[in-house]
């Protein structure tokens, strides 16, 4: 009997050791977890062949899709520059589908109103600000776009913008963008001689001058031949 407490203490001391042996011998979830792999398995997968994204032109879609399918494309045009979408919108203003007519007319009018609002604001901007002067001429040219202005309206609009081009060249610094926009205005207003005089203010190496020299030379040649 005196050895009873000693035996009990020895058994208690050996118990943790026996438990650790049992854990090591009997399979557990930890053994199953050893098959996990680290890293991204997609990085080792074969890559799909690359292919260039070729967007479908809106003009092609307008000829291939039904009127119902074109509604989404017409509505999406409100997020694009009106000068880029105006030709297609004008076509749908004259189409036979009432819904597309309404959408196209609404977007076309919205874009025209936005340009007219900006044009009005820029007319009253500081005439010595070359950046705003260039923007004024750019917006004026956009308003006179053949898809936004009728044949009767366009000459008057271009003459009006050309007047501002002459005025702003007298009051604002001759920065390259202002000179280029003024040359585009004079070219559109059938004043190629003025356009030539304006681009001569740009360096011969200027990209803007190189871009405008050919159409101006062509217009001068046509005027001499007429």
Image: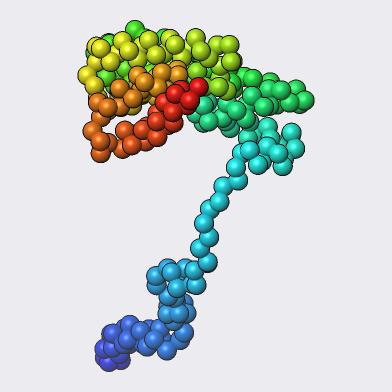
Q: How many marks?
A: 0
Q: Residue furthest top?
A: 124
Q: Residue at x 73, y 26 (%)?
A: 95
Q: Residue at x 36, y 20 (%)?
A: 193
Left or right, 131 with reference to 104: left
Q: Residue at x 45, y 86 (%)?
A: 26
Instruction: State the image coordinates of residue 14 (x, y, percent, origin top left).
Output: 31, 87
Q: Residue furthest right?
A: 96
Q: Which picture quadrant has residue 128?
A: top left
Residue 135 vertical placement versus 57 (above, below): above
Residue 145 vertical placement versus 153 (above, below): below
Q: Nearer the viewer, residue 186 or 15?
A: 186
Instruction: State the image coordinates of residue 214 (x, y, percent, origin top left).
Output: 40, 34
* Colour theme: rainbow
Q: In this view of the protein, can residue 124 be seen by the observer?
A: yes
Left or right, 141 with reference to 202: right
Q: Nearer the viewer, residue 68 or 22?
A: 68
Q: Quadrant of the N terminus?
A: bottom left
Q: Residue furthest front?
A: 225
Instruction: State the image coordinates of residue 18 (x, y, percent, origin top left).
Output: 36, 87
Q: Which picture quadrant has residue 105?
A: top right
Residue 21 vertical placement versus 88 (above, below): below
Q: In this view of the protein, can residue 135 be seen by the observer?
A: no
Q: Nearer the viewer, residue 50 or 21?
A: 50
Instruction: State the image coordinates of residue 47 (x, y, percent, origin top left).
Output: 49, 69
Left or right, 41 with reference to 197: right
Q: Residue at x 53, y 60 (%)?
A: 51
């Amino acid at each position: 009997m005196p050895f009873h407490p000693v035996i009990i203490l020895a058994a208690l001391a050996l118990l943790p050791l026996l438990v650790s042996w049992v854990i090591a011998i009997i399979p557990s979830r930890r053994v199953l977890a050893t098959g996990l792999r680290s890293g991204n398995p997609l990085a080792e997968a074969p890559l799909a062949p690359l292919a260039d994204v070729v967007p479908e032109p809106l003009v092609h879609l307008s000829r291939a899709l039904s009127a119902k399918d074109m509604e989404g494309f017409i509505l999406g045009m409100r997020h694009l520059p009106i000068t880029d979408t105006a030709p297609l919108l004008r076509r749908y203003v004259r189409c036979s589908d009432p819904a597309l007519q309404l959408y196209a007319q609404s977007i076309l009018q919205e874009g025209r109103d936005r340009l007219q609002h900006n044009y009005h604001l820029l007319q009253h901007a500081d005439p010595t600000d070359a950046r705003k002067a260039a923007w004024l001429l750019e917006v004026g040219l956009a308003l006179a776009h053949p898809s936004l202005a009728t044949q009767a309206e366009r000459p008057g609009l271009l003459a009006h913008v050309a007047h501002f081009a002459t005025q702003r060249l007298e009051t604002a610094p001759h920065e390259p963008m202002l000179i280029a926009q003024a040359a585009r205005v004079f070219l559109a207003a059938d004043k190629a001689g003025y356009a030539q005089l304006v681009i001569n203010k740009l360096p011969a190496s200027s990209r803007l001058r190189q871009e405008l020299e050919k159409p101006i030379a062509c217009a001068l040649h046509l005027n001499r031949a007429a």
